[in-house]
Image (cartoon, rainbow, N blue to C red):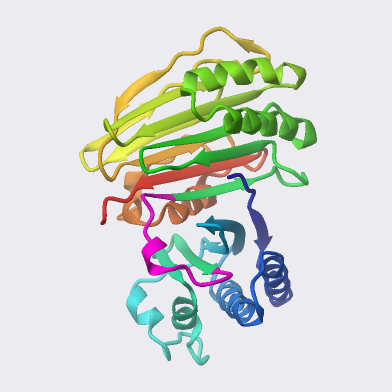
Amino acid sequence: MITQTLALRVLEPSQAGEARRSAIALAMSLGFNETERGKVGIVVTEIANNLVQHAKDGLLLLQVIAKHNIQGLEILGLDTGPGISNISEYIRDGFSTRGTPGNGLGAISRLSSFFDIYSIPNMGTAILCHLWASPIPKSLCSNHLELGVVCLPKAGEEVSGDAWACEISQERSLVLVADGLGHGPLAAEASTKAVRVFAENIHRSPQEIIAAAHQALRSTRGAAVAIAEINFADQSLRFAGVGNIAGSIFWSGGKYNLVSYNGTVGCEVRKINEFRHQWYPGGLLIMHSDGLGTQWRLERYPNLIHKHPSLIAGVLYRDFYRLRDDVTVLVIRENTLP
């Protein structure tokens, strides 16, 4: 699975209308019927209007998601506005701080298949929604892993030089983040080829996949590549990385950082080594390219670690994105609920 995120600035009413049209067009391309597209339009309109009325630096992120061959749309609203002190009160229909009908968050929550929100007063708010082209059977609703990703190009570029991919199963899951050297189409060519090698070699170890990618990427400008494998049977994580892809593991008892070696896959690699760590039930893995600053600290955000991975990725992107680079933030959590 590989997708990129569509980012839409929402600073004034005309941009809110454009966001609604873009979301409905994307939903139509995914096979949403008229009724489900109507839900998408209302949810995006409500989020966008909130960004215009209450927020600062409002941003709407749209991403295609899939579950058991059913297409869906993930909507993530981000801002650095005043935040919300009492979320449960704001979600209640009829509540308003601006004299409007006050149906915004209540309608968003009611129409979405999944809804989550994170807000800190004076720091901003993040709102997450999932909507699906058709209902997902209850027997298929639970996921062994929850995944959230933001993958965006440098401002002014049409395509991102970053890419990501994952292969998730009940026994073993693999995730990759790749950052092609530089920006634009040539960087994208390198990272896309790394994803292709990953897909062709998912039965192999992270170290072996990166070694294969090193040979395959010699015709490109090269890329930083990191791969993590979570083995649920023996509660282990194996990690191999070359270049500036950062990785961290969080669990109830603490955290540790993952190590990548210097070099560029496809160009110069002095050493490819694989590290083995313990994986803790309910653990959280965060991987990101150097488009995200390294000064972030998850513990500075109360309870964010317990939120959906897409909210975590969105908040980190909002607060630590380096404007001069492509960026990928990938967050994955094991779901220990039955």
In the depicted structure, whether residue 337 falls above or below residue 29:
above
Q: Quadrant of residue 14?
A: bottom right
| Spot occupied by residue 279 in the image (x, y as percentages of width and height) | 29, 33
Residue 140 magenta-drawn? yes
Tag count in the figure? 0
Q: Is residue 280 visible?
A: yes
Residue farthest along the top direction in this orientation: 270
Q: Is residue 266 left or right of residue 328?
A: right
Is residue 287 located in the magenta-colored stretch of the structure?
no
Rendering coords of residue 161 (x, y %) = 69, 36
Specify the quadrant that holds the N terminus: top right
Toward the left, the furthest residue is 253
Would you say 307 lies left or right of 168 here?
left
* x 63%, y 81%: residue: 38
The residue sitting at 62% across, 33% down in the picture is 195
Residue 249 placed where, x, y %?
35, 35
* Looking at the image, residue 113 lies above or below residue 64: below
Image quarter hosting the C terminus:
bottom left
333 on left or right of 130: left
Dominant SS in magenta: loop
Q: Is residue 119 visible?
A: no
Residue 253 rendering spot, x and y as whole percentages: 20, 38
Which region is colored magenta?
132-146
In front: 66, or 329?
66
Look at the picture and state if 117 lies above or below 35. Answer: above
Residue 201 lies in quadrant = top right
State the residue at coordinates (61%, 63%).
60
Give the side of residue 197 with respect to residue 146, left or right: right
